[in-house]
Amino acid sequence: MTDQDKLKHKAAEEAVKHIESGMVLGFGTGSTFNHVLSILSEKLKTGELENIIGVPSSEKTFTLAEKLNIPCETLAEYPSLDLTIDGADEVDNKLNLIKGGGGALLREKIIAQASKKYIIIVDESKLSENLGEKWAVPIETIKIALEVETNYLQSLGAEVKLRMNKDNEPFITDEGNYILDANFGRIRNPKKLAKKLNKRAGIVEHGLFLGMADLVIVASDKGIRSLVK
């Protein structure tokens, strides 16, 4: 386990303390959240936690949860969630987030909005003063709108790249869409940018998660700290 993985694991351990038996949980996506699944699986095996149901935000998370014998359902069965835990690609000093590095931003946002509490876990490398300092904004785009929305994002000053998979083919989301990674640089007014993106018919969803996190758990070499909205 790398040093960064150790920090992710520590953050995950802290987040799992918020889980209680009988909860319906939203499951995030990505390498950080996978530590939560590992820890949760052990607690279910030992009986420390019981009657947990998870609602995964991606097919990858669903597959891993199944392998770890964690019961999963969908939002159709459980449209209201007690708690969602997830990672983030970048967190600013107001607890706004950039998410979508794993390609599941649409489902992640839907699940977050369906949750009574939303906890984000990160290592300290993900913190920044302003969003965009370290990460481009993932933009999930309908296929036929690829060129139109690429041009639009460029008109806003972004450097835009179509996300590719390991086979050097366009990455396809679980909902069958493309992702454009739009690098705006430092985003001075994320609310204004989000409002512009929300108006675009070809943009299904974007990776700006603003004012959504209730708690951000940050792991560093100095220990764990909690940032509260």
Image (cartoon, rainbow, N blue to C red):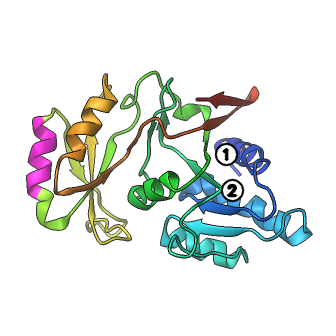
Specify the principal SS of the magenta part.
Answer: helix
Magenta stretch holds residue 217 = no
Residue at the (25%, 38%) spot, across then down: 195
Q: CA distance from mark 1 to mark 2?
A: 7 Å
**In the figure, 197 relative to 204: above or below?**
above
Q: Position of residue 20 (x, y in %)?
A: 80, 56
Task: Write the start and end of the magenta stretch as one range.
Answer: 147-155
Q: Mark 1 or 2 closer to N-term?
A: 1
Query: 36 or 27: nearer the eye?
Result: 27
> Quick check: 198 left or right of 58?
left
Spot occupied by residue 131 in the image (x, y as percentages of width and height): 39, 30
Q: Position of residue 98 (x, y in %)?
A: 42, 41
Say which mark, if any, is on residue 107: none
Residue where numbered disc 2 is placed? 35
Residue 184 visible within the image: no
- Residue 8: which disc? 1
Q: Quadrant of the C terminus?
A: top right
Residue drawn at 33 percent across, 40 percent down = 136
Image quadrant assignment for residue 158:
top left
Mark 1 lies on a secondary structure that is helix
The kind of residue tagged 1 is Lys
**Closer to the camera, 125 or 94?**
94
Q: Image point 59% across, 61% down: which residue?
A: 27
Q: Amino acid at mark 2?
A: His
Q: Are the two marked residues, 1 and 2, in contact with CB atoms closer than 8 angstroms?
A: yes
